[in-house]
Amino acid sequence: MVKLTSRDALLVVDMQKDFMPGGALPVPEADEIVPTVNRYIDLFEKRGLPLFFSRDWHPENHISFKENGGIWPVHCVQWSEGAAFHESLRVPPGAFIINKGDRPELEAYSAFQGTILRSLLEERGIRRLFICGVATEYCVKHSVFGSLNLGFTTFLLEDAVKAVELKKGDGKRAIEEMKEKGAIILQFNLIES
């Protein structure tokens, strides 16, 4: 069992409409993890622990878009409906919103890349980061790697992530990679409530 402490924070990665079924870049069944993500949010909020929500926040001419030489369809354009969080996701008033990929020339899978996330965590004395969201093998994985590289003890909340699965098994492989790098794989029932 893992006991939460005052040195812990939750990072919810990219739970945006464009990544949900029917969105511009859908992650299959991504909407199905919303209730579990909300349980984690409630748990951390009740303990008074910091909550961080990353979101792709792309300008219209972003480098990741196919029309600009990237590999993805246009998605999560700043201020668009698709860039909004899923309507059932609970984003408490005190939560921190981390915009990433907001410069045209910079691809950013990790919530740490080109953002102030690291300083916000360090200012609050955070030592352990609990990470969930989409997509397992892209922004979640890179955020986990970023967290580990910066020296945070990093938990992947396995019951609250979904993979794109461009190739079958990508999600599972990404979880193995994260584990090998030092991430601790965790599920809700293993956190002391």
Image (cartoon, rainbow, N blue to C red):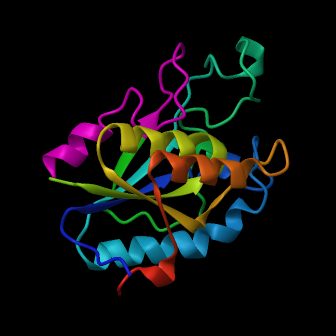
- The residue sitting at the front extreme is 180
Give how far across and how far down residue 99 sits, in percent. Answer: 43, 37
Q: Is-magenta flag for residue 169? A: no
Q: Residue furthest bottom?
A: 193
Task: Please tell me which residue is depicted at 31% across the width and 40% down the height of the picture.
Answer: 117
Tell me the quarter of the picture where residue 49 sits.
bottom left
Image mark count: 0
Image position of 148 with respect to 8: above or below: above
Above-or-below relation of 162 to 65: below
Q: Residue at x 52, y 74 (%)?
A: 187
User: Which span is picked out in magenta?
Assistant: 99-124
Q: Residue at x 75, y 23 (%)?
A: 71
Compared with 11, 38 (above or below) is below
Q: Is residue 122 magenta?
A: yes
Residues 95 and 140: in front is 140
Characterize the magenta stretch by its predominant secondary structure: loop
Q: Quarter holding the C terminus?
A: bottom left
Picture coordinates of residue 174, whole percent (x, y) = 64, 48
**Considering depth in this image, is 67 or 166 the residue closer to the camera?**
166
Residue 94 in view: no
Is residue 178 at all visible to an observer of this figure?
Answer: yes
Q: Quadrant of the N terminus?
A: bottom left
Q: Position of residue 6 (x, y in %)?
A: 18, 68
Left or right of 73 on screen, residue 78: left
Going by the image, does 71 lie left or right of 88? right
Tell me what residue is drawn at x 59 percent, y 43 percent.
83
